[in-house]
Amino acid sequence: MSKPPLKTHRRVGQRWLWGILGGTGILIHLGTALLRLETFFPYPKLMDFAAFYAGAWAVRLGVSPYEWSAELLERLRAETGLSIYPPTHHSPPLWAWLLQPLTFFAFPTAAIIWLLLLLAFIIWSAMALAQLAGYKGWKEKAVILFLAVTFGPVFLNLTLGQNGVFLLVAALIIGQALRVRTWITSLLAALAWVPAVGAKLSPLIWIGALPLLQRWRLFVLAILILLLVLGLASLLTPTASRDYWLRFLPERIFSYSEEVGIDDQSLVAWLDRLGRPHTFGVPGLSVTQQHTVIWSPPWSVDPHVIRLGGYFLVALLALIPIAVLLRVGPAQAEGAFYLWVLYGLLIFPHTERYNHVLLLPAMAWLWSRGGPGRTLVILTYFLVGLSRLTHLWAILLPAPWGPLASGFGLYAVFLLGGGMAISLLVNDPRFRQMYRLVDAPGVSGIFARRDEP
């Protein structure tokens, strides 16, 4: 009896390796989700939603939501049952204005409504991700829904009541509009930008992908709708708008640049944690238990040098997605847009781990390509799981290992973005023709689409 060839053994070994990494990732994502289930009982105690709720009340009463007054908080405690001290409200005034209908409910009821709304959006996103990944059966969709709900950044949005799910929905709707070019899809995509920009300003950078992809109709439509809505919001919330644009936003940009957080997954923040001493307060297994973490690496780089070097790297890295967007054809526009969304996760300060819900469209798109693309998706999923344990790494690991471990989410973005860029270029007809000219057989098969030989 002949022995199995060496290549067969290697393939089996590789499958076991990726299976172990994927299984470990599932255990981490699911395990950390189970540890936070107590957040939802006896009613959802959603910290960040408390800020949205209080902000909506502030706008309704005609005061600024960017500095809590004792009178406002006392009124909310007495009249709405707001037992959580709300953190700082970071979203633009448009967000607080849009959420005013929730102020007609007591806080526990409003929190339940908010949680159900987030779950509904996650279910819709899971179905869209399944379609993007190439799956149509209900069993496959059920698995993707399970993976989406338990995905660390998604569940973090649920336990905090954050609004990253709105950005995920908007990214998927815009991506679909780039795949199916009609007036209806363009209008829906332009409208999807409204809640996304209302939630956070970072989706404004997504508009920059449209001229590079030569999608001028959607570009003009999105600009016009956003100008109209933001202008209307400024008229309807004059006090909040003045405070946000003239005081709060400039102060926050400066403070985030000067003092980085341990959960910030932007490139500059990671370099700052790695480059000089830091002291952080982080929760343990219980959010009420605080640990003081002191990182003292054997070096200390001037923070101005770190920031300048970081900004230079960010600008240099922009050349990669720009080159890809300029090169790809219409059939690749959706994937190129998701690559641009990934780049946005590198550049903005205060990119918390819950923002990494935006990895999901790129993961689904790359998974549909099959082959090596799927192994990169599994590894990305595993790295995001390790990122879910950032506070544990901070407590256990000294510098420089602790700062290095604090960037697992950043590494996931780099890995996925690199895979996306390679896949998009290799599947570009001009790129493949170039390799035929230099007689490099097999190169065009890397990251090839599933329907290609």
Image (cartoon, rainbow, N blue to C red):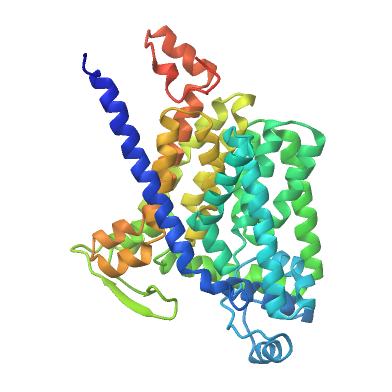
The outermost residue toward the left is: 298
Q: Is residue 346 above or below residue 187?
A: below
Nearest to the observer: residue 243 or residue 96: 96
Q: Position of residue 104 (x, y in %)?
A: 80, 77
Q: Residue at x 70, y 50 (%)?
A: 193
Q: Is residue 381 left or right of residue 56?
A: left
Quarter assignment of residue 434: top left
Q: Position of residue 273 (x, y in %)?
A: 33, 62
Q: Position of residue 312 (x, y in %)?
A: 40, 47
Q: Residue at x 28, y 64 (%)?
A: 276
Q: Position of residue 447 (x, y in %)?
A: 45, 26
Nearest to the observer: residue 242 or residue 340: 340
Quarter assignment of residue 335: top right
Q: Is residue 16 left or right of residue 81?
A: left
Q: Is residue 307 visible?
A: no
Q: Is residue 379 left or right of residue 45?
A: left
Q: Quadrant of the N terminus?
A: top left
The outermost residue toward the front is: 1
Nearest to the observer: residue 359 or residue 159: 159
Nearest to the observer: residue 206 or residue 413: 413
Q: Is residue 389 visible?
A: yes
Q: Is residue 297 left or right of residue 436?
A: left
Q: How many marks?
A: 0
Q: Residue at x 59, y 54 (%)?
A: 202
Q: Is residue 323 above or below residue 417?
A: above
